[in-house]
Amino acid sequence: MKVGVVKEIKSDEYRVALTPAGARELVQGGHDVIVETGAGEGSSFPDDAYRSVGARLASVDEVWRDAELLLKVKEPLPDEYPRLRDGLVLFTYLHLAASDELTRALAESGAACVAYETVETDNGALPLLAPMSEIAGRLAAQAGAYFLEKPLGGRGLLLSGVPGVAPGRVLVIGGGIVGYNAAIIALGFGANVTILERSVDRMRHLDEILSGRVSLVMSSSLQIEESVAEADVVIGAVLIPGAVAPKLVTREMVAQMKDGAVLADVAIDQGGCAETSRPTTHSEPVYVVDGVTHYCVANMPGAVPITSTKALTNVTLPYVEAIADHGLAEAVARDPALARGVNVLDGKVTYEAVADAHGLDFYPLEDVLPLSPV
Ligand SMILES: NC(=O)c1ccc[n+]([C@@H]2O[C@H](COP(=O)([O-])OP(=O)(O)OC[C@H]3O[C@@H](n4cnc5c(N)ncnc54)[C@H](O)[C@@H]3O)[C@@H](O)[C@H]2O)c1
């Protein structure tokens, strides 16, 4: 199959959908890999790194024209809509429930559109989202430690403390992938870490893997109120699948926080879990409300494209290889997780939540693309 990789054109997006290592696997598998000139630069992969593993470097027009399977990181932007066409398989993050315009553009194009974020295993795990949550959680702890520094508007506290001076307190609300990763970095700093969770099973698991090094406490509004007031860094890491984030930290709770404390609301991409949170960017990551520094960057992994690109392609490559080796129809017949990733096919919306979000008709995938058992 001809597999194309284009340079991302969304502002502040430095990731690329395929590493040279991934390109080599595909070339060794007998596929043609066509990479847009300069596509890997933002992630420190020069054109030569792709050329040397057998990929062809080409202009953006050529990649879109020649590719049968097009790999991207972010959703197509309006400038790219005219490039979508019947017969093309597009594999990327799409987040279609958030955009009526994009959903209609994809449907009108006739392209088969597979979304990273809805590839879902039988046990409900989202393997192509997990690495970004791991990165965001780790970065959140780092950002918390950094913005506690006095010249940056923080309390002027070293999170680790030193012998003779107590460490700072980190409160993580939500002990999922983001929360666990935030906690292990905060523990690495030597901070005193508490995780508030509402799933007892998840807390049992965290207790096992963290060997009792964090306090695990049932999340309730009273507990949140008390813990937030004591914390130097609060990390918002809750998720209710398919819903906007619950506003667990109220404006009054923020007002009770220590002066110069940091609130890193990772859940900001779902609206944020504090009433005072609003999305920020890497160029202006923080703002202050009631003396509390708010860090609410909506695309945190974008700050570390080398790591993010490698982590993303580690998990996408097996699916890319499956589509390239077998074609989309057979690949989804073989793998229900990949089948759940198909959002738009032959002009029809095949993912129910996306159809519901935009008042469009929903077509079960098996009606559009008969999934004969292999
Ligand atoms: N800003 C970014 O760049 C970025 C990057 C990746 C993920 N995220 C966001 O981070 C959030 C967390 O993602 P995740 O992958 O860790 O999700 P996850 O599903 O792995 O974890 C969420 C956890 O929140 C817990 N939870 C739900 N309600 C709670 C409550 N009231 N109190 C305490 N805990 C509660 C759940 O039990 C679950 O363990 C999501 O909103 C996700 O979109 C943001």
Image (spheres, helix red, strand yellow):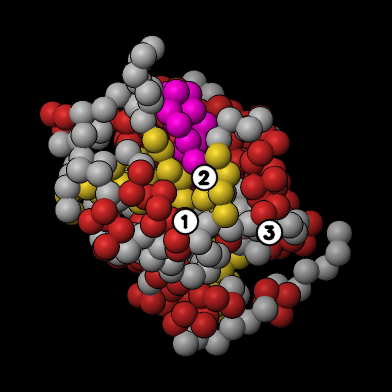
The residue lying furthest to the right in this view is 374
Residue 184: x %, y % from top left: 52, 31
Residue 326: x %, y % from top left: 73, 51
Q: Is mark 1 in CB contact (under 8 Å) with mark 2? A: no
Residue placed under numbered mark 1 in the picture: 223
Residue placed under numbered mark 2 in the picture: 195
The residue located at (25%, 44%) in the rendering is 258
Asked whether residue 321 is drawn in magenta, I would say no
Q: Which amino acid, mark 3?
A: Gly
Res 68 seen here: no
Magenta extent: 179-194
Spatial CA distance of label 1 from label 2 is 11 Å
Asked whether residue 192 is drawn in magenta, I would say yes
Q: Which amino acid, mark 2?
A: Ile
Disc assigned to residue 124: 3
**Helix, strand or loop for disc 2:** strand
Q: Nearer the viewer, mark 3 or mark 2?
A: 2
Residue 306: x %, y % from top left: 41, 30
Q: Is mark 3 in CB contact (under 8 Å) with mark 2? A: no
**Helix, strand or loop for disc 3:** loop
